[in-house]
Image (tube, rainbow, N blue to C red):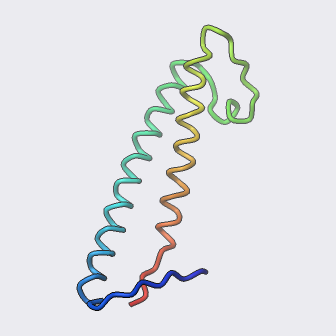
Amino acid sequence: MEKIELSTPDPEKVLPILEDAIARQKRLLAQSLARSEERIQQLAIQLGVNPDRLVAGEIPHPENQDMDLLELEGELELRRHLQAQLESLEHLKLCP
């Protein structure tokens, strides 16, 4: 695991601020992830597609659904990105 070092003249004050900021970011990511998941489910039901098959490229894009399918693909990519960010924060450890 890599380390990042911060220098501060007052670590007792900075550490709680960093811990709070990390916790707040985790909450925001978790909320965004939940909203993205809801949107994925709505679009998948509306379009009648399996999101995993869409990502695998197994679903054709008929012209009348192209924009909706692209929106679903974008939402799936957003979910992947949010999950990766949240996972990286979950492994973060502050070492005073």
Residue 94 is drawn in which quadrant? bottom left
Residue 28 is drawn in which quadrant? bottom left
Q: How far from the left and from the top, in percent, is residue 52?
A: 66, 36
Total numbered labels placed on residues in the image: 0
Q: Is 92 located above or below residue 77 in the figure? A: below
**Outermost top residue:** 64
Q: Is 25 located above or below residue 15 in the figure? A: above
Specify whether 70 is left or right of 56.
left
Q: How far from the left and from the top, in percent, is residue 43?
A: 51, 25
- Residue for point 39% across, 61% down: 26
Residue 6 is drawn in which quadrant? bottom left
- Residue for point 70% across, 32% down: 53
- Residue for point 30% across, 89% down: 11
Quadrant where the image shows the N terminus: bottom right
Q: How far from the left and from the top, in percent, is residue 75?
A: 52, 35
Q: How far from the left and from the top, in percent, is residue 5?
A: 47, 85
Camera-side residue: 32 or 38?
Answer: 32
Quadrant where the image shows the C terminus: bottom left
Camera-side residue: 44 or 88?
Answer: 88
**Outermost left residue:** 13
- Residue for point 65% across, 9% down: 63
